[in-house]
Image (tube, helix red, strand yellow):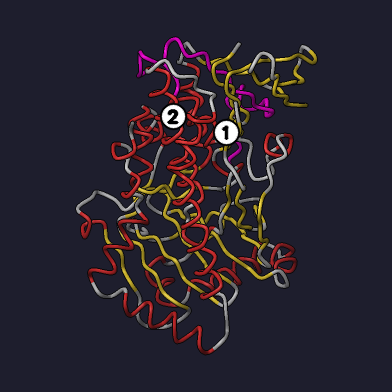
Amino acid sequence: MFDVLIVGAGMVGASLACALGDKNCATNRDLKVGIIESNGNFLRGEFTNDGRASAIAYGSSQIWQNIGVWGGMQRRGVTPMRVIQVSEGDLPYQVQLRCEDMGQEALGYIVENSVTLASLWEFARECQNLELICPAKILDVEYVRDRDVMRVKISSEIGEQYLETKLLVGADGGRSQVRQLAKIQISERQYEQTCIITTIKSEKSHQNFAYERFQASGPFAILPLGSDRACIVWTATKEETPALLALDENSFLQELTKRFGSPLLEKLGHISVESRVRANYVPRCMHSQTYVQSRLALIGDAAHTTHPIAGQGMNLGIRDVNALANVLKAAHQNNEDIGAIAVLKRYESRRKWDNLGVILLTDVSNRLFSNHNWLFKVIRRLGLLILQISLFKRVLMYFMMGLHQSPRSRES
């Protein structure tokens, strides 16, 4: 019998497992936690480096630091964002968000997903109260009313078996099987866009600048890696995506450099594409009607997804982890039933409005900036001018950095 059984050992699920681990928290030692992951490569320490990286807000890095995993990520390599430059197309004026304006060492960090996963799995292996069940897939979930437990049917290398837990956590992504098996309804909207991800190397240092350039097809983000590399998140329209993905390397580079613009190319010098594969996905916003049922909770993309326009998706998942871990640990220490709906509702109430607010803001922002309408052009250019005012800029940075959901302010 598990106290907590987590389905999905990606960045969000593994973060929750580490938060409930006993390596840095002795009070977790009598919590029995299991984590089910279908990708057997993770167990062998093989984390695909496909060029994907995540923008980690300063507040999220503090959550990972509290858990004890941030040091492993720093050791493997994280890149601080000290300035984020926001502009529209080729307009001469832009907004610069600087870390010194908030009195912090960085606005956030760019961390390659392979670095995050390697660090989390290293930490999880060192927790005595965690059991890694990998490779394994869930086949069914069932609430057993007479025993008041959740029963999970899985398939692994030893065949099919049943596991029982006081709490089942779905951390298995936007197409969550846990959510579907629990028959939790969602509202969603798929965008007529594709996000193309690639990694480039530049002749000159990026100097820890990140760039968000709004163009007619959608946002074009340049996220710093190391001293002279960058992760590109290029939002293309549905119509232009097939042609872009079919281009040979030289033609793709030519199209890519057009999106940089002359001033930025002068700063970076000659660029080359490092990624062998052009990772891509269709963005969507999605929100579950509920995050919790008796003996069940959803976190991260299993509960909500958002447009990547502001790089907030992973940060919402990390904040889910922080809220749920704090609720569960407090309930456990107070001898409460950690799978009871009253306990789980505390988690949902802490996270629902923050998640909904970000989903709405990113959806409106994408509609506003990916539009040729003259009125929208006036509004967004006026918005960029307003952000030149210090007060508005600081408010935006406060929320982008996740400081409104800092670890200490959300502890029970």
| Quadrant of the image containing the C terminus | top left
Q: Is residue 36 magenta?
A: yes
Residue in the image at 35% along x and 19% along y? 24
Pinpoint residue 222: horizontal percent, then vertical percent. Answer: 46, 61
Residue in the image at 39% along x and 30% along y? 326
Relative to 375, does residue 396 appear above or below in the rendering? Answer: above
Pinpoint residue 140: horizontal percent, then vertical percent. Answer: 76, 26
Relative to 291, does residue 198 appear above or below in the rendering? Answer: below
Q: Residue 335: give its label.
A: none
Q: CA distance from mark 1 to mark 2?
A: 12 Å
Predominant SS of the magenta segment:
loop
Relative to 126, does residue 182 appear above or below in the rendering? Answer: below
Q: Residue 297: give its label.
A: 1
Q: Which residues are magenta?
A: 20-49
Residue in the image at 46% along x and 35% along y? 321
Pinpoint residue 192: horizontal percent, then vertical percent. Answer: 68, 67
Residue furthest right in the image: 159
Pinpoint residue 19: horizontal percent, then vertical percent. Answer: 43, 26
Question: Which residue carries the number 2 mark?
Answer: 325
Residue in the image at 44% along x and 56% along y? 223
**Residue type, mark 2 in image:** Ala
Relative to 350, does residue 135 appear above or below in the rendering? Answer: above
| Closer to us: 146 or 260 | 146
Q: Secondary structure at mark 1?
A: strand
